[in-house]
């Protein structure tokens, strides 16, 4: 199991938007150059963030802005916006464990509660970190360059 790069790209994009918002129009092409991906990847990601109410996108070359204050946007908000998690479940279970095997027959009883607990801990931690927290650290690192 691995969280896709959409999550870290989304964080990167939000940091760029916030960092450059007063200096330039932040377009998908500009963001793509920072992330070093095709602008189409950024446009798809921005649509997901827009649908979640995290950014506003002005069509054409109008640019992108953060829609809410950055201390109100958590890593969990971003994760929920860009990750394709079925029914809110982080862990995808294999489809057809063998009912004739004692392990296969009981694998859900063995793992479900543990996996739910792991997901809850991860979500709680992600909910405690905001883009403002990350921006604070990012500003220090960028200024030290």
Image (cartoon, helix red, strand yellow):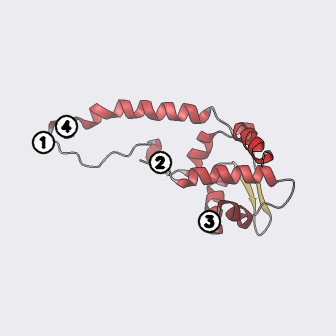
Q: Is tag 2's residue or tag 4's residue first in the polypeptide sequence?
A: 2
| Left or right placement of residue 141 versus residue 125 in this view | right
Give me the residue at 39% from left, 34% from top.
115
Of all residues, the one furthest to the left in this rendering is 100
Q: Is tag 4's residue or tag 3's residue first in the polypeptide sequence?
A: 3
Residue 103 has which mark? Answer: 4
Q: CA distance from mark 4 to mark 3?
A: 44 Å
- Whether residue 69 is visible here, answered yes or no, is no
Q: Secondary structure at mark 4?
A: helix
Give the residue at mark 3. Answer: 37
- Whether residue 8 is visible here, answered yes or no, is yes
| Left or right placement of residue 95 versus residue 63 in this view | left
Marks 2 and 3 in Cβ contact (< 8 Å): no
Judge depth for marks 2 and 3 and give the one in front: 3
Q: CA distance from mark 2 to mark 4?
A: 26 Å
Q: Is tag 1's residue or tag 2's residue first in the polypeptide sequence?
A: 2
Q: Secondary structure at mark 1?
A: loop
Q: CA distance from mark 1 to mark 3?
A: 48 Å
Marks 1 and 3 in Cβ contact (< 8 Å): no
Marks 4 and 3 in Cβ contact (< 8 Å): no
Give the residue at mark 1. Answer: 100
| Left or right placement of residue 90 versus residue 23 in this view | left
Give the residue at mark 2. Answer: 85
Marks 2 and 4 in Cβ contact (< 8 Å): no
Judge depth for marks 1 and 3 and give the one in front: 3
Task: Give x and y (percent) for residue 144.
Answer: 78, 45
Q: Is tag 2's residue or tag 3's residue first in the polypeptide sequence?
A: 3
């Amino acid at each position: 199991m691995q969280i896709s790069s959409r999550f870290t790209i989304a964080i990167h994009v939000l940091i760029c938007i916030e960092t450059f918002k007063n200096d330039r129009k932040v377009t998908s092409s500009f963001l793509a150059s920072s992330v070093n991906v095709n602008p189409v990847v950024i446009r798809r990601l921005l649509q997901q963030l827009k649908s979640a109410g995290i950014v506003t996108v002005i069509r054409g070359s109008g640019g992108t802005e953060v829609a809410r204050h950055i201390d109100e946007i958590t890593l969990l908000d971003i994760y929920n916006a860009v990750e394709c998690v079925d029914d809110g479940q982080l862990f995808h279970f294999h489809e057809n464990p063998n009912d004739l095997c004692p392990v296969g027959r009981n694998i859900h009883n063995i793992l479900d509660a543990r996996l739910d607990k792991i997901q809850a801990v991860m979500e709680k931690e992600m909910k405690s970190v905001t883009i403002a927290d990350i921006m604070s650290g990012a500003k220090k690192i960028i200024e030290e360059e």
